[in-house]
Amino acid sequence: MESLPAERKALLFTAGRVGLALRLSQVREIVAVPEEAPEVTFRGTTVPGLPVAVALGLPAGPSRFALVTEAMPPVALRVEAVHGIIDLAAAEVFQLPDRTLLPQPSPFQGAVVTCGTVFLELVVPALGWAPIEPAGELPGPPSELDFPTGRELLFSRGARTYAAPVQLLAQVLDGPAVFPVPLTPSAHRGLLYHGRAIHPVFDLPILYGDPAPEGAATALLIEAGGNAIAVLADRILPGGEAVGREVSRPSWDLLFSGS
């Protein structure tokens, strides 16, 4: 049976500064609302207004719109902005990568990418009136190799210098656009879209117990444990510049393999 037209379309919106999506078949109506109203009235019916940013543990901005859902009983999702409706045939729809660790049941069933921007597809029944408890932190610091095992690429992030074996390196990307995923461990910075695929993005200093750096000039796509992951870097170091530095060599195959 052919899917209904509403199933082939998605509404794009923002809550807590995160891009989100919802299949149009789940949306009954879009209503402009006063910022602080606890309830939403539409067509003579009043339903409770659920702030999506609060449910996802995000800083809430002014919620100027409510998405009245087809859930029973109906609920109105309060969001900051509505960006429009897209045909999913003209977009890319992905499952989230295995290393995107989320609490269960997950509030996201996948990701929609349009014009290079990632929107997380929301699972309405997973939302509640209290903030969802985030996933547990990743263990750290990671196990390390004691010596180089071949050709390496050296890079800095924060106060440390790291080494990645060249044979594991898939790509070096300048100016990466990282799209946040709420409720993941703090070392998981979000998702990166590249080469018609999405990759989880990690920040190594957090695993080593260092402060989280701001921004990143570069991302390294690394084939680790059978999965392509992105690791943030401040800059790539020429070989001679690393002389005298202490170099961290994580066991990449174990670090993000899920073992």
Image (cartoon, rainbow, N blue to C red):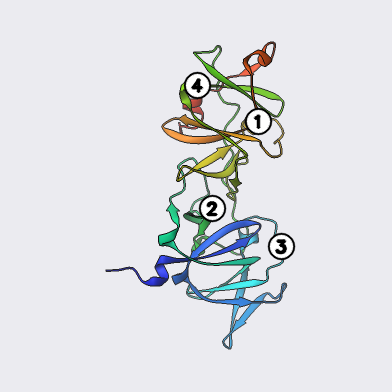
Q: CA distance from mark 3 to mark 4?
A: 43 Å
Front tag of 3 and 2: 2
Q: What residue is at 64 percent from the left and 55 percent from the top?
A: 57
- The residue type indicated by label 2 comes to Val
Q: Earlier in the sequence, mark 4 or mark 2?
A: 2
Q: CA distance from mark 1 to mark 3?
A: 30 Å
- Inter-mark Cα distance, 3 to 2: 20 Å
The image quadrant that residue 36 belongs to is bottom right
Disc 4/disc 2 C-alpha distance (Å):
29 Å
Residue that mark 2 sits on: 118
* Residue wearing tag 4: 166
Label 4 residue SS? helix
Q: Which mark is residue 205?
A: 1
- Chain-order first, disc 3 or disc 4: 3
2 or 1: tag closer to the N-terminus: 2
Q: 237 above or below 193?
A: above
- N-terminal-most mark, 1 or 3: 3
What mark, if any, has residue 61 been given in the picture? 3
Q: Residue drawn at (59%, 29%), measured in percent from left and top?
A: 140
Is the residue marked by circle 2 packed among few (<14), some (14-19), or many (20+) residues within 10 Å? Answer: many
As measured in the structure, the alpha-carbon distance from the residue carrying label 4 to the one carrying label 1 is 21 Å
Can you give x and y, in whole percent of width and height, for residue 168 in the image?
47, 25
- The numbered mark, 4 or 1, whose residue comes first in the sequence reads 4
Q: Is residue 129 above or below residue 117?
A: below
